[in-house]
Image (tube, grey):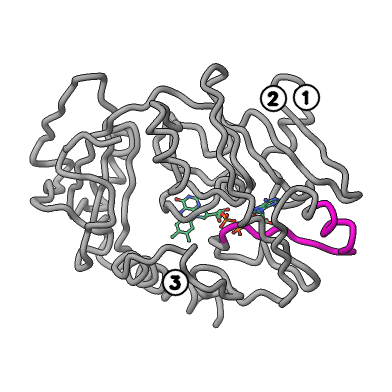
Amino acid sequence: MDKREFLKTSGAIVAGTIASRLASGQSHAQQPAPHENWAGNIHYSTDHVHTPANLDEVRDCVKKCAKLRALGSRHSFNRIADSNANQVSLEHLNQIDIDEKARTVTVGAGVRYGQLAPVIDAKGFALHNLASLPHISVAGAVSTATHGSGIHNGNLATPVRALEIVTANGEVLNLSRDKDGDQFAAAVVHLGLVGIVTRVTLELQPTFQVAQTVYQNLPFSELEHNFDGVFGAGYSVSLFTDWQNHRATQVWIKRRLASGETHTSAPDFYNAKRATRKLHPITEHPAESCTEQMGIPDP
Ligand SMILES: Cc1cc2nc3c(=O)[nH]c(=O)nc-3n(C[C@H](O)[C@H](O)[C@H](O)COP(=O)(O)OP(=O)(O)OC[C@H]3O[C@@H](n4cnc5c(N)ncnc54)[C@H](O)[C@@H]3O)c2cc1C
């Protein structure tokens, strides 16, 4: 498929895949590992995928392979996680350790946001921001500075406090924001090039409630003239675009609530109309897998 055709069809393909996976209630963990990325537009170039069970096995794997590429949860749309020699999946490194005093959580490189969020919420903690899908791995999202949303929120690499990395000679390197300064800062968004990350430590904050309101059909002319107003309207704002019809079919506005606060949203938002029911990003699909809407507070 050439680039033009891919760009034309990829939105529909990816959206369809999200919808069918969410509608069937399947998680990635329950599916056999396909040797392609999640969207199905990239077929990886090797069948040699190693799945070590622990740090020592990761070290052995690194020592045995002359060439090796880490594979996250396979969500990148490009060949960044591909290899023509060997890949290593950290999916079995799924430990989650909360340090309440330090307000940090350390996760194995296989942990996905959907696994992490309920565990930290149960202990009264939250992350400042999340990936758009619960299936994306923390280590993979950090490695590419996955951006999340919200104009005042740093990307998903910003809360990283420490990394555990197996380097090319099989040694374990620990880097932390407090002790390693520039070396740490240079390693956080690593695009898979500093070694195999086995653990990531993230900063936590007290859990908080969000009231989300969805508006439908925001004209691009309004967006063009009120860009800062649209994206500054909440803690986090996402648009789902319809380039053919020059509009955003949906605007998702998340407002962060202070303790005990409630929020009543306006019926109109720059000529978009407040939705009267909970919506999936693809309006025709069932919305039960999506985060809470209609201004109802939720973690
Ligand atoms: C539906 C959908 C929506 C998305 N929305 C957004 C969005 O809103 N904003 C945004 O910025 N991105 C978005 N993305 C992109 C996605 O968040 C990034 O591509 C992210 O890097 C995927 O993480 P992954 O775990 O799947 O990593 P992979 O795609 O598997 O790998 C990505 C890179 O990380 C490296 N890597 C992964 N794990 C390790 C490890 N343990 N050690 C060393 N290197 C490692 C790989 O080598 C590779 O270089 C979206 C993707 C999808 C499919």
Residue 89: give x, y in percent of width and height. Answer: 67, 60
Q: Badge 1 is on which residue? A: 180
- Determine the residue positioned at 28% across, 30% down: 209
Q: In this view, does 92 lie above or below 233?
A: below
Left or right side of 110 for 292: left
Q: Distance between the residues labelled 3 and 2?
A: 38 Å
- Disc 1 CB within 8 Å of nearest ligand 1 atom: no
Determine if residue 247 is in view: no
Q: Count up the numbered dots.
A: 3
Examine the structure image and report whether residue 253 is included in the region drawn in magenta: no
Question: Disc 3 marks which residue?
Answer: 10
- Can residue 113 be seen here? The reply is yes
- The residue sitting at the top extreme is 101
Give how far apart the Cα atoms at labels 1 and 3 are.
41 Å
Question: Which residue is under mark 2?
Answer: 177
Q: Please, is residue 256 above or below residue 291 in the view?
A: above
**Image quadrant in which the C terminus is located:** top left
Q: Which amino acid does label 3 sit on?
A: Ser
Front of the two marks 3 and 2: 2
Hey, what amino acid is under mark 2?
A: Arg
Q: Quadrant of ligand 1?
A: bottom right
- Label 2 to label 1, Cα distance in Å? 6 Å
Q: What element carries label 2?
A: helix
